[in-house]
């Protein structure tokens, strides 16, 4: 039986090689038919994909088009420097924008420093535009909005000098390849500066998707002014107490009430000038907030150059910290500050000069971090007690003391309050320019 079985198997295998064998079992004919059908289908499908492949691909692309990038170029004409922020976004299916890439370049001094030479001021802006043209692909130049917004530096200038600078920039923009209109050049209102800074911080922290009550307060310390902005936890109360500083703002299709107050004159550079000239607006000044080793150290603010000499101190070569602190406290008190109680309920993110001086003092590294106001005070006292003269940072003692006093006495924050100090978020610059760009792309210039 075993031998017979093997023989039968062999015969069947041999029969499979002869397609015209009339004696082949029925099952073998069915198998051949299936093979034939499979071969024909394979040829048809293969031909379709090889002959019509490119056409098929085109149809898929047309049905699911790739999102076109959108660009914006913003010039921040600040008091201490001018900066360009060129931004690349892509649109999401919901209509919002996702940040893809950015260019950040700055030049010094600021535009306001060219008050007596507006053409040279415009040339400094032209340098930044040249960088932006390398960042934005040429085919998108005509559709890319360009705007320059001047901040506290120009706000502090006489009107005719500020207008002279703005007019030169307008003429410059008329010969650039980006999209501009009559709204492209202007002095920015301090409240808008605060709103856009707040948006930038919360956008980069991804705090605008979902409940806006998860947003953070933004403190932006510039050279000429400081802005403080947040969503109040008790809108009705703060609207009742401070209605002039409440703005209804549309964010991600939701309207919210934002508290935003800009203090002109409380920026770090403006505060230095106020401390130096506390006894009179003279160009040659003596200040207890600077070491005695400083002999006529030049300090430029707005259109003036002050020559600062340190006052003799009972501490020897060190600064008399308590005396300096008392002068700074008097300067801060000359400007009324709201001290909104609701700020105590907020997570606070502070940037610009807040971050810069904290890094100088070793309180944070490049990535930033959380610092208490008490730590600022301790760093200020350490710096003021230094006996060696720091030629590169002659005003470091003053700056750290000012920031400490401003946060505690100016805005009413207890010394135990922790503040997050940041310069960038996920590699992106913290600047009101990002918020302005987003607003322009969604609403127009």
Image (cartoon, rainbow, N blue to C red):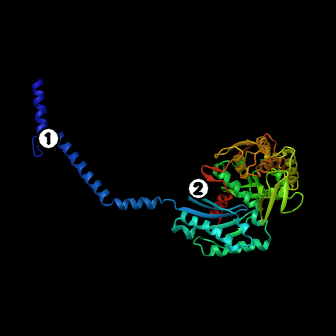
Quadrant of residue 384 in the image? top right
| Rendered image: mark on residue 131 | none
Using residue 54 as the reference point, say whether residue 298 is left or right of it. right
Residue lying farthest right?
279
Q: Position of residue 230 (x, y in %)?
A: 75, 51
Quadrant of residue 347 in the image? top right
Q: Secondary structure at mark 2?
A: strand
**Dot 2 crowding, Cα within 10 Å, few <14, some 14–19, many 20+:** some
Numbered-mark total: 2
Q: Secondary structure at mark 1?
A: loop
Does residue 214 show up? Answer: no
Front-most of 196 and 354? Answer: 354
Q: Position of residue 148 (x, y in %)?
A: 67, 67
> Which numbered mark, 1 or 2, is in the foreground of this view?
2
Q: Position of residue 111 (x, y in %)?
A: 70, 66
Using residue 284 as the reference point, say whether residue 177 is left or right of it. left
Does residue 108 show up? Answer: yes
| Rendered image: mark on residue 16 | 1
Q: Position of residue 33 (x, y in %)?
A: 20, 46
**Dot 1 crowding, Cα within 10 Å, few <14, some 14–19, many 20+:** some
Whichever of labels 1 and 2 marks the residue nearer the N terminus, that label is 1
Front-most of 401 and 22? Answer: 401
Front-most of 398 and 11? Answer: 398
For label 2, the residue is 99
* Residue at x-position 23% and y-position 45%: 34
Residue lying farthest top?
1
Front-most of 327 and 58? Answer: 327
Image quarter (top left, top right, bottom left or bottom right) of the C terminus = bottom right
Q: Is residue 182 above or below residue 253?
A: below
Q: Is residue 426 above or below residue 176?
A: above
Image quarter (top left, top right, bottom left or bottom right) of the N terminus = top left
Quadrant of residue 105 in the image? bottom right
């Amino acid at each position: 039986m075993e031998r017979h079985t093997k023989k039968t198997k062999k015969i069947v295998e041999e029969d499979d090689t002869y397609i015209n064998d009339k004696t082949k079992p029925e099952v073998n004919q069915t198998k051949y038919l299936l093979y034939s059908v499979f071969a024909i289908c394979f040829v048809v499908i293969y031909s379709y994909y090889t002959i019509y492949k490119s056409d098929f691909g085109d149809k898929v692309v047309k049905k699911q088009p790739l999102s076109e990038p959108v660009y914006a170029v913003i010039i921040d004409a600040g008091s201490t420097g001018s900066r360009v922020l060129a931004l690349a976004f892509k649109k999401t299916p919901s209509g919002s924008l996702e940040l893809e890439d950015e260019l950040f370049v700055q030049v010094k001094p600021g535009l306001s420093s060219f008050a007596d030479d507006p053409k040279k001021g415009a040339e400094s802006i032209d340098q930044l535009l040249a960088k932006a043209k390398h960042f934005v692909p040429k085919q998108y130049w005509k559709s890319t909005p360009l705007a320059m917004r001047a901040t506290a530096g120009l706000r502090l200038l006489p009107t005719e000098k500020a207008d002279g600078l703005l007019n030169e920039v307008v003429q410059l923009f008329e010969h650039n390849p980006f999209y501009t209109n009559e709204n492209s050049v202007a002095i920015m209102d301090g409240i808008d500066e605060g709103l856009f800074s707040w948006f930038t911080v919360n956008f980069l922290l991804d705090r605008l998707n979902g409940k806006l009550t998860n947003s953070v307060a933004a403190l932006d310390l510039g050279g000429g002014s400081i802005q403080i902005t947040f969503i109040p936890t008790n809108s009705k109360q703060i609207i009742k107490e401070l209605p002039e500083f409440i703005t209804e703002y549309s964010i991600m299709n939701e309207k919210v009430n934002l508290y935003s107050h800009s203090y002109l004159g409380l920026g770090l550079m403006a505060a230095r000038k106020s401390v130096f000239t506390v006894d009179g607006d003279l160009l040659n000044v003596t200040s207890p907030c600077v070491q005695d080793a400083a002999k006529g150290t030049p300090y430029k603010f707005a259109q003036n150059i002050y020559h600062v000499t340190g006052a003799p101190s009972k501490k020897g070569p060190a600064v008399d910290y308590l005396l300096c602190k008392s002068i700074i406290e008097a300067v801060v008190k000359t400007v009324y500050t709201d001290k909104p109680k609701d700020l105590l309920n907020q997570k606070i993110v502070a940037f610009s000069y807040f971050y810069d001086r904290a890094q100088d003092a070793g309180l944070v590294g490049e990535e930033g971090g959380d610092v208490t106001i008490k730590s600022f005070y301790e760093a200020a006292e350490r710096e003021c007690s230094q006996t060696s003269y720091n030629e590169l940072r002659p005003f470091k003692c003053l700056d750290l003391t000012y920031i400490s006093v401003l946060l505690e006495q100016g805005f009413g924050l207890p010394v135990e309050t922790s503040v997050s100090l940041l310069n960038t978020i996920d590699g992106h610059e913290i600047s009101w320019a990002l918020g302005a760009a987003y607003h322009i792309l969604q609403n127009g210039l």
